[in-house]
Image (spheres, rainbow, N blue to C red):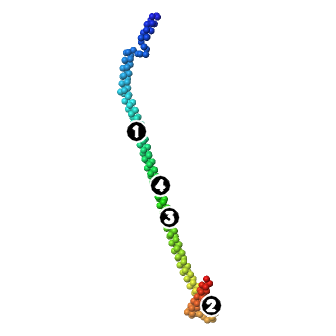
Amino acid sequence: MNHALVQLAAEAEKENPLIPPWPELVIGLIAFVIVFGFLAKKLLPTINKVLEERREAIEGGIEKAEAAQTEAQSVLEQYKAQLAEARHEAARLRQEAQEQGAALIAEMRAEGQRQREEIVAAGHTQIEADRKAAASALRQDVGKLATDLAGKLVGESLEDHARQSRVIDRFLDDLEEKAEAAR
């Protein structure tokens, strides 16, 4: 039995358990080449196709994002330009309105001044006409009273119109001279 064990040990030393026998190594290598060839022909193009589609999608997404960002920047610049233009237009309109308002106020003041002057002139004219009418009425009334009074004092009637007119005029002229002298 010892001898059988020694032979087994000698055979075991001849064959390295880490190195497979040649026929198994050849069959394994052929099977590897078949599997690798199948994977290279069928699976690798599909994987490459999926990877290429992914790469294109990512690059397309980046390009789209850059295009969208460029467009957004352009729209923002247009918006800012329109906003600045609108502000400028509003300032111009505000200035125009202020100028028109000032012109309208000046025009209304001038019109008010003109109307005031017309009213004052019309008032002076009316006052002068009323004064003349009152002076005439007063002259007649004073003349009548003076004639009556003078007639009573003198004792005769001063019915003669020419005489009456001269007496009244003389009396009133005397009154006016006294009034002017008193001033």
Q: Earlier in the sequence, mark 1 or mark 3?
A: 1
Q: Amino acid at mark 2?
A: Leu
Residue at (62, 93) in percent of width and height:
151
- What residue sits 38% from the left and 26% below the top? 39
Residue 34 position, x and y percent, is 36, 22
Q: Which numbered marker is on residue 102? A: 3
* Disc 1 and disc 3 in contact, CB within 8 angstroms: no
Give the mark nearer the N terminus: 2 vs 1.
1
Q: Say whether residue 167 is visible.
A: yes
Which quadrant holds the C terminus?
bottom right
Tag 4 residue: 87
Residue 181: horizontal and vertical position, in percent?
61, 85
Q: Pointer 3: residues within 10 angstroms few (<14), some, or many (20+)? A: few
Which residue has dot 2 on it? 149
- 114 to 169, vertically: above or below: above
Which of label 1 and label 3 is nearer to you?
3
Determine which quarter of the picture holds residue 35. top left
On screen, residue 98 above or below 6: below
